[in-house]
Every structure is written in C-alpha cells, then in structure tokens.
Image (tube, rainbow, N blue to C red):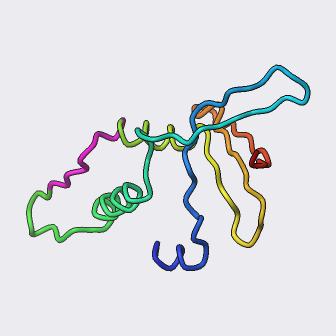
Amino acid sequence: MFENLKKIHPDFYPKALMKPTISSGTPRNVHFEFETNGFLTAQELFELYGHCSEVIHTHNPFKGNITINFRLSITDWAARIEKLLTFHLFRLAGLPQVWVGELSDPQNGKAHVYIASPN
C-alpha cells in the first residue's frame, strides 16, 4: 500500500521541523530547520503499521497466547508522532505549494497550516 502511495505522491510523508526562529523586523520572517531525530520516520510508520495490523487482526484462538513486540512503548510511539506533527513541512499531491503544519495543542487537536516560501 505504501509503495503505491509513494508512486502516486513521492512527497506524501511530512518532514519534521524544529521550533521556528521568528524575526522581529517588518516583514516578520519565520525560519525553520529540519528536525534530525526523535520524530516518527516513514520507516517507523511502516513498522508501527505492521505491529498494529498484528494486533487488530483476529488470531487463531487455538494457537495460545501471542506476544507482539512493539519495540517502543505506546507512550514513546505517541511522543514520536507528536514530535513529527508539532511542526512539519508537507506538499499536497498535484500542487506546487509547500505548507507548514503546526499541531499547536495535541490534547485538543488544535492545528494551523501556513503556506511556506523558501528563502
């Protein structure tokens, strides 16, 4: 499924950004650097998807207990997802614009989206 998605939209996966630096001048400029670690990578998304698929699909009840190793705790997985989405760069399929998404309040689902221009 993910390979087909990448064929249709190679930039489907967001790029994690660090907290921006904001200039005090006019016009106000906002500068982002790319995050380098601690966020959910595309490879980890595929890994987590596989683990979750194992959990939600019915297992043969005659096999006995089944243990699934998630590698990280659910809290750690959630923190990686939150770090990816706090500030992220993304592009919609078929559109030239680049956008910055901000998950400003993860507990309440508050988010903002801004058009980005490289400078």
Q: Is residue 49 left or right of residue 83?
A: left
Residue 106 against residue 54 in the figure, above or below = above
Q: Position of residue 116 (x, y in %)?
A: 76, 48
In the displayed image of the protein, which residue is found farthest to the right?
26
Q: Residue at x 53, y 73 (%)?
A: 6
What residue is at 52 percent from the left and 43 percent from the top? 84
Number of marks in the image?
Answer: 0
Of the pair 98 and 84, the residue shown nearer to us: 98
Q: Outermost residue toward the front? A: 119
Give the vertical position of 103 relative to 9 (above or below): above
On the rendered image, what quadrant is the C terminus found in? top right
Q: Is residue 118 left or right of residue 39?
A: right
Lateral position of residue 17 relative to residue 79, left or right: right
Residue 59 coordinates in the image, percent (x, y)? 22, 68
The answer to which image quadrant residue 68 occupies is: bottom left
Is 18 located above or below residue 7 in the figure? above
Query: What span is in magenta?
Result: 67-75
Return the residue nearer the eye: 111 or 5. Answer: 5
Q: Which of the 4 image quarters holds residue 88?
A: top right
Residue 66 placement (x, y as % from top left): 14, 58
> Magenta stretch mostly in which secondary structure?
loop
Does residue 73 appear left or right of residue 83 in this picture?
Answer: left
| Image coords of residue 19 (percent x, y) | 61, 30
39 within the magenta span: no
Which residue sits at x=57%, y=54%? 14
